[in-house]
Amino acid sequence: MMPLSTFDIAGRAMAAQLVRLNTIASNLANAGTVSGSEATAFRALKPMFTTAYSGQAATVDVTAIERTGNPERTNDPSHPLADADGNIWTAAVDPNQELVEMVETARQYANNVEVLGTAKALALDTLRLGR
């Protein structure tokens, strides 16, 4: 495997953060949704990352997206989705935690955009030196 450049590393990190941001968006969109059974209730999506090494450089890979959390059971026999026992299940999503994750993800994505900008500027300055 060829060594990874700064552009490769930052690009892969940005791709991983984009996956993370998409799962957060899905979680926020499904927060508060109700289901008629525990099995069909929405559970928060969380991407799983692993470190990928190439020579002296390391970057990140998304290896899986897992569903986490346990839906909250509420007894509400009047709800149209209630089961035979009168229970409904609310999505296992904490909107506050998801918003914190979203801010952190956006910052990490922005940091990688800055890395790409700096690497590009340095490469262009190096080319100008050769003139």
Image: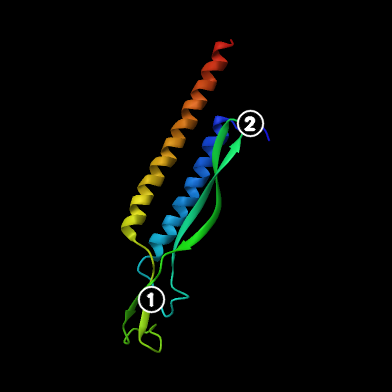
* Direction from residue 46 to residue 6 in the image, left or right: right
Q: Earlier in the sequence, mark 1 or mark 2?
A: 2
Above or below, 127 relative to 66: above
Residue type (three-letter) at the residue carrying disc 2 = Pro
Residue at position x 34%, y 61% from top?
94
Tell me where residue 2 appears, x and y as whole percent.
Answer: 67, 32
- Residue 7, labelled with which disc? none
Above or below, 5 relative to 82: above
Tag 1's secondary structure? strand
The quarter in which the C terminus is drawn is top right
Residue at position x 36%, y 56% from top?
98
Tell me where residue 10 appears, x and y as whole percent.
Answer: 51, 36
Can you name the residue that lies furthest to the right here?
1
The quarter in which the N terminus is drawn is top right
Tell me where residue 34 appears, x and y as whole percent.
Answer: 38, 74
Tell me where residue 103 appears, x and y as whole percent.
Answer: 35, 47
* Displayed quadrant of residue 38: bottom left
Q: Name the residue under label 1.
A: 89
Q: Name the residue under label 2.
A: 3
Residue type (three-letter) at the residue carrying disc 1 = Trp
* Direction from residue 130 to residue 82 in the image, left or right: left
